[in-house]
Image (cartoon, grey):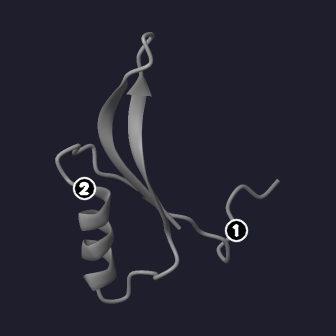
Amino acid sequence: MKLLDEKKRFFIMNTYSPQLSLNDLKKILHSVPGFPTNFEATTLGLMSTPGKELPLGNLVRF
């Protein structure tokens, strides 16, 4: 069984900084030379019982 394939890679980055907006993070990543332009970015949070979300930061993956 082969667990890792050298041709198929992924990268996940969590900011854990609710103060950094998702748009600001995207702008930063687009300004980094060589960073992939095709990535998924979303916010992270925990949902409480009453239905309120506790923001935890952002997640980027490609």
The location of residue 2, given as percent across then percent down, is 77, 58
- In the picture of the structure, the residue carrying the numbered disc 2 is 21
The location of residue 55, given as percent across then percent down, is 31, 35
Residue at 46% from the left image edge and 81% from the top image edge: 36
Q: Can residue 49 be spotted in the picture?
A: yes
Q: Quadrant of residue 22?
A: bottom left
- In the picture of the structure, the residue carrying the numbered disc 1 is 5
Q: Is residue 12 left or right of residue 14?
A: right
Name above or below for residue 61 compared with residue 33. above
Which element type, helix, strand or loop, lies under badge 2?
loop
User: Residue at the bottom extreme?
Assistant: 33
**How many marks on residues?**
2
Residue at 23% from the left image edge and 43% from the top image edge: 18
Q: Is residue 55 left or right of residue 49?
A: left
The location of residue 62, given as percent across then percent down, is 53, 68
Name above or below for residue 15 compared with residue 39. above
Residue at 42% from the left image edge and 11% from the top image edge: 50
Check disc 1: other Cα within 10 Å, few if <14, some if 14-19, many if 20+. Answer: few
Q: Quadrant of residue 52?
A: top left
Q: Nearer the viewer, residue 22 or 51?
A: 51
Q: Nearer the viewer, residue 29 or 52?
A: 52
| Identity, as a three-letter code, of the amino acid under mark 2 | Ser
Name above or below for residue 24 compared with residue 21. below
Which element type, helix, strand or loop, lies under badge 1?
loop
- Is label 2 in contact with label 1 (beta carbons under 8 Å)? no
Check disc 2: other Cα within 10 Å, few if <14, some if 14-19, many if 20+. Answer: few
| Identity, as a three-letter code, of the amino acid under mark 1 | Asp
**What's the CA distance linking mark 2 and mark 1?**
34 Å
Residue at 50% from the left image edge and 71% from the top image edge: 39
Q: Can residue 12 be spotted in the picture?
A: no
